[in-house]
Amino acid sequence: MEKLRMCIACRQMKDKRDLLRIVKDKEGNISVDLSGKKNGRGAYICKDETCLEKLKKQKSLNKAFKTNVSEDVYNEIREVILGQK
């Protein structure tokens, strides 16, 4: 049984393995979770630039994690997405 998750930018349901997980740990640090197993609150995004742009524009990560997300986090996500193409 595949595990479906929703992209917080485009709101499409996709297989967990096709999405990139961003996690906020107990200390409040936000990072890209390449293993998919880090502890903390997770949010998922499609591995493409369109969703990354929507994510920034809509401030979806800020809403998901109830905090202001720094530009460094978006840069880290961009590097991972571009590195996988």
Image: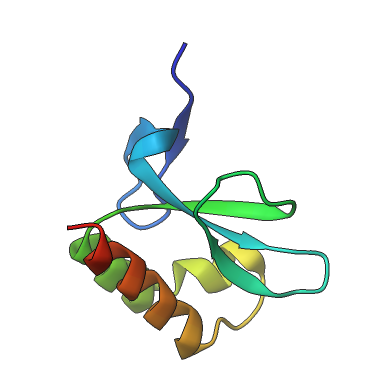
Which residue: 26% across, 65% down? 83
Query: What colour scheme has been applied to the protein in the rendered image?
Result: rainbow
The percent position of residue 57, horizontal first and vertical second, equals 32, 77
User: What is the residue that sits farthest to the right in this orientation?
Assistant: 26
Front one among 63 and 33: 33
Horizontal relation, residue 69 to residue 6: left or right? right
The percent position of residue 82, horizontal first and vertical second, equals 23, 68
Quadrant where the image shows the C terminus? bottom left
> In which quadrant of the rendered view does residue 31 lie?
bottom right
Which residue: 44% across, 35% down? 16
Horizontal relation, residue 32 to residue 37: left or right? left
Determine whether 77 is above or below 42 in the image: below
Which residue: 38% across, 45% down? 19
Horizontal relation, residue 50 to residue 44: left or right? left
Determine whether 80 is above or below 33 in the image: below
The percent position of residue 52, horizontal first and vertical second, equals 30, 67
Front one among 60 and 40: 40
> In which quadrant of the rendered view does residue 77 lie?
bottom left
The total number of labels drawn is: 0
